[in-house]
Image (cartoon, helix red, strand yellow):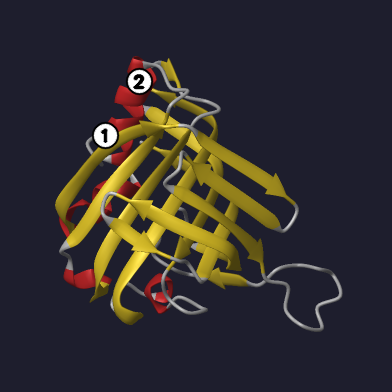
């Protein structure tokens, strides 16, 4: 059976701006480890006949300085608004079991920290995006408009290997508190994507 997801994407990590890991997983993070929260806000989706539109999934990772070396620790939040059937299908997609972008990252993960259901609130307001996941995650990021750019168009990072797509909008965290799955950090670097699209 096939599946497809489309929506918006947000992340914040413990690196300083701009996160070198996003430019390439083979570049070292700012600090000894990279801690990152990846949020996929699904606007439209169907997984093997189950409608998953309007739900959100977030993955938290704790990785060595050089991400491409593997040994990632990974935990996943699935929207509490999801039914059991929806949660099962989303879990299969985000574990990589049904193929797609997360399957490519699977070999890098050495420790699965589990899957939790939690209320996830996403707010998108122009250049600002905020995410709250229960009491565990609370962050706001703002897309970066370069000095002198009169159109107001934010900066982009293009041609990258990333599950959300090959082009990301550069952002920075204006508020960040993450404490989940034994992963704690305050984010600095950030990226967003107004639209991601997956299918398999």
Q: Which residue: 53% across, 66% down?
A: 190
Judging by the rendered image, the residue that carries numbered circle 1 is 98
Q: What's the CA distance linking mark 2 and mark 1? A: 10 Å
In this rendering, is residue 189 above or below 128? below
Number of numbered discs: 2
To which quarter of the image does residue 135 belong? top left
Q: Is residue 140 left or right of residue 33?
A: right
- Horizontally, residue 137 falls left or right of residue 8, namely left
Q: Earlier in the sequence, mark 2 or mark 1?
A: 2
Category of crowding for the residue at label 2, using alpha-carbon neighbours closer than 10 angstroms: few (below 14), some (14–19), many (at least 20):
few
At 37% from the left and 74% from the top, the residue drawn is 21
The x and y percentages for residue 132 are 53, 44
Residue at the spot 47% in from the left edge and 67% down from the top edge:
187
Q: Which quadrant of the figure has residue 3? A: top left
Q: Is residue 162 visible?
A: yes
Q: What's the mark number on residue 48?
A: 2
On the image, the x and y values in percent for residue 182 come to: 26, 54
């Amino acid at each position: 059976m096939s599946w497809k997801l489309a929506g918006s994407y947000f992340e914040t990590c413990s690196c300083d701006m701009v996160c070198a890991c996003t430019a390439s997983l083979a570049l070292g993070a700012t600090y000894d480890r990279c801690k990152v929260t990846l949020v996929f806000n699904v606007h439209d989706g169907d997984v093997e006949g189950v409608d998953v539109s309007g739900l959100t999934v977030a993955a938290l990772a704790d990785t060595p300085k050089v991400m491409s070396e593997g040994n990632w620790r990974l935990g996943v939040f699935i929207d509490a608004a999801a039914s059991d059937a929806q949660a099962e299908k989303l879990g299969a997609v985000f574990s990589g079991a049904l193929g797609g972008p997360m399957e490519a990252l699977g070999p890098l993960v050495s420790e699965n920290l589990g899957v939790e259901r939690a209320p996830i609130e996403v707010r998108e307001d122009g250049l600002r995006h905020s995410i709250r996941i229960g009491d565990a995650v609370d962050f706001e990021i703002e897309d970066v408009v370069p000095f002198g750019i009169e159109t107001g168009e934010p900066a982009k990072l293009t041609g990258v290997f990333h599950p959300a797509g090959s082009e990301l909008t550069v952002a920075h965290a204006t508020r960040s508190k993450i404490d989940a799955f034994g992963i704690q950090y305050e984010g600095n670097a950030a990226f967003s994507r107004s639209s991601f699209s997956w299918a398999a």
